[in-house]
């Protein structure tokens, strides 16, 4: 798409007899538009679940960095027409506000790395991925992922897959959900995703 845009602009420039105007179009206007496209592609935020309300650019929000152990959560507020940011735990003075790009809270390091590489083209080096407690975090996140998959299988009504013990009663499913909450508390992830458990 970007390539076609430039080719069409070049064709238009070939029709122009004023060389200075053609140079201006090629060297000033086109790069500016390409920069706008790049900015949109890297900073755009889906408004609402799966972009239900469209996609927007929010300059202040786009300055937030990623962490696999975020201290804020963002959501689009339809009533006020703005992307809002809420703290998910105590934030001390001087702490950086960080959000999770994509749903990475209870994914393993490899899964998070793939999500971040595909969606944002970077490798994460946050405390959860590369800090001194990364091995313990990985163990908890692996447990959370397994519980998440078991509960999704239970909710869908499928029989046990991959040797996982899928609950057969609501009480068993509730016990797993409570185990997930304990892991989330240990991990310090008490945010909107708890409602999905």
Image (cartoon, rainbow, N blue to C red):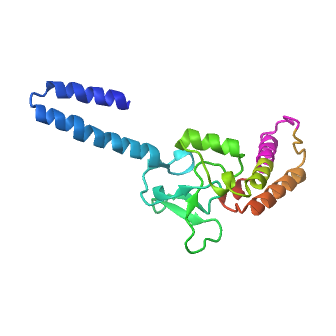
By secondary structure, the bulk of the magenta-drawn segment is best described as helix
Q: x, y percentage for residue 194?
A: 71, 58
Q: x, y percentage for residue 61?
A: 47, 59
Determine the image quadrant of residue 40. Answer: top left
* Up/down of 56 relative to 164, above or below: below
Left or right of 184 on screen, residue 113: left
Q: Please give the name of the residue rendered at 18% of the width and 28% of the height, measured from the top-left corner.
A: 13
Magenta segment: 144-163
Q: x, y percentage for residue 29?
A: 24, 40
Q: Please give the name of the residue rendered at 88% of the width and 36% of the height, measured from the top-left corner.
A: 163
Q: x, y percentage for residue 50?
A: 56, 45
Residue 158 on the magenta segment: yes
Name of the residue lying farthest toward the left: 18
Return the residue nearer the eye: 40 or 134: 134
Name of the residue lying farthest toward the front: 132
Q: Please give the name of the residue rendered at 85% of the width and 50% of the height, measured from the top-left corner.
A: 173
Q: Please give the name of the residue rendered at 55% of the width and 58% of the height, measured from the top-left corner.
A: 74
Name of the residue lying farthest toward the bottom: 93
């Amino acid at each position: 798409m970007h390539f076609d845009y430039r080719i069409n602009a070049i064709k238009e420039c070939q029709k122009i007899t004023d060389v200075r105007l053609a140079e201006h179009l090629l060297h000033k206007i086109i790069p500016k538009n390409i920069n706008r496209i790049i900015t949109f592609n890297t900073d755009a935020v889906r408004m609402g679940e799966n972009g239900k309300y469209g996609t927007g650019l929010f300059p202040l929000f786009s300055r937030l960095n990623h962490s696999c152990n975020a201290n804020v959560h963002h959501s689009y507020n339809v009533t006020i027409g703005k992307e809002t940011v809420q703290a998910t735990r105590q934030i001390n003075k001087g702490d950086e506000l960080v959000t999770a790009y994509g749903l990475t809270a209870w994914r393993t390091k490899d899964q998070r790395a793939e999500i971040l590489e595909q969606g944002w083209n970077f490798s994460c080096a946050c405390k959860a991925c590369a800090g001194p407690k990364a091995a313990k975090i990985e163990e908890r996140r692996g447990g959370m992922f397994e519980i998440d998959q078991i509960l999704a299988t239970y909710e869908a009504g499928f029989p046990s897959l991959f040797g996982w013990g899928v609950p057969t009663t609501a009480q068993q499913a509730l016990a797993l959900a409570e185990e997930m909450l304990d892991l989330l508390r240990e991990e310090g992830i008490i945010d909107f995703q708890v409602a999905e458990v």
